[in-house]
Amino acid sequence: MVLGIGLVFMLAPLVLVFASSTHTTSTLQLQGLQWLPGDQFVQNYGRIFSFQAGFTDEITPLGMLENSLIIAFSVAFLTTVLSLLTAYAIVFFRLPGKHIIFWFVLVTLLFPLESRFINTFSVASSLGLINTHAGIVLPALAAALGTFFFRQFFMTLPKELIEAASLDGAGPFKFLKDIVLPLSFSRAGAIFVIAFMIGWNQYLWPLMISTDDSLYTLVRGIRFIGQESGPGMAMVVITMLPPFILLLVFQRWFFNSLSAQS
């Protein structure tokens, strides 16, 4: 019963948005969001795919989708790699003060990107990263959650495994490649999904770092169509689809990893 109630609360907003995306804008403005589907599905979604905006009409659905995918996949891949390597160094290398280093990494969880916009923008500007994909991606890579996640898993690996690898003459790189990476796939999949969501849903930072129409993402593009309109609701549905598809693809790794950590 509890799970059923929770499922209703989680799915209700999705059903509400999708049903509203099939109604006219006037219906939504007069009657509010709708729970039942309407008859404007083809018209609303068709307007999305023919949409153009900006001074030179560079803001298009395909262009925004391409930018969103580039940013989200870059954030997801680089965050996963950096988190894994950081945790690997902290756990398996004899570093002076490595526990202090780890706690400094965790402290960054207390300072989200929004709280350091001014300093981050200054650094990005000095490096010439304004109006670039790199300027949007790089500040989002410092993900302490991924490092913590991998560290907790690495600490559960039996010492006998490490000793056997040492006896076989495996160095740090070979141990990482042949033993640690294969065992970390499910965890890496979970971190990849979480980091993809972070990269995909960015709004304030891309708005601040980029003024070029060719760098607009789907999340930023919603405001051009109108959040309270039928096409605007259709744009919201389209924006939610890629993360949802990715979660379906990685769902086994994702949930196995969470259950193994718990």
Image (cartoon, rainbow, N blue to C red):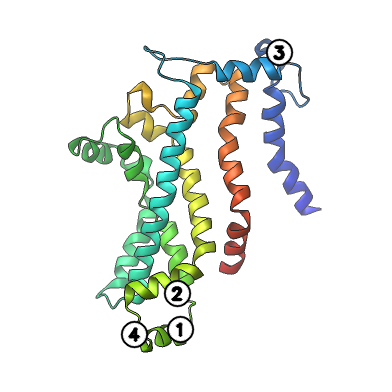
Chain-order first, disc 3 or disc 4: 3
As drawn, 101 above or below 207: below
Mark 1 sits on what residue?
161
Callout 1 touching callout 4 (CB < 8 Å)? no
Q: Earlier in the sequence, mark 3 or mark 1?
A: 3
State which tag comes first along the sequence, 4 or 2.
4
Which residue in the rendered view is the most extreme toward the left?
Answer: 126
Report how far apart the C-alphas of labels 4 and 2 lie in the structure: 13 Å
**In the rendering, at what x and y percent does residue 45 appear?**
63, 20
Frontmost of labels 1 and 4 is: 4
Which residue matches tag 2? 179
In this figure, which residue is indicated by the disc labeled 3?
27
Q: How many marks?
A: 4
Image coordinates for residue 56, horizontal then vertical, percent: 37, 12
Measured as percent of width and height from the top left, residue 62 is found at 49, 26
The residue indicated by pointer 4 is 169
Q: Amino acid at mark 2?
A: Ile
Q: Earlier in the sequence, mark 1 or mark 2?
A: 1
- Secondary structure category for the residue under label 1: helix
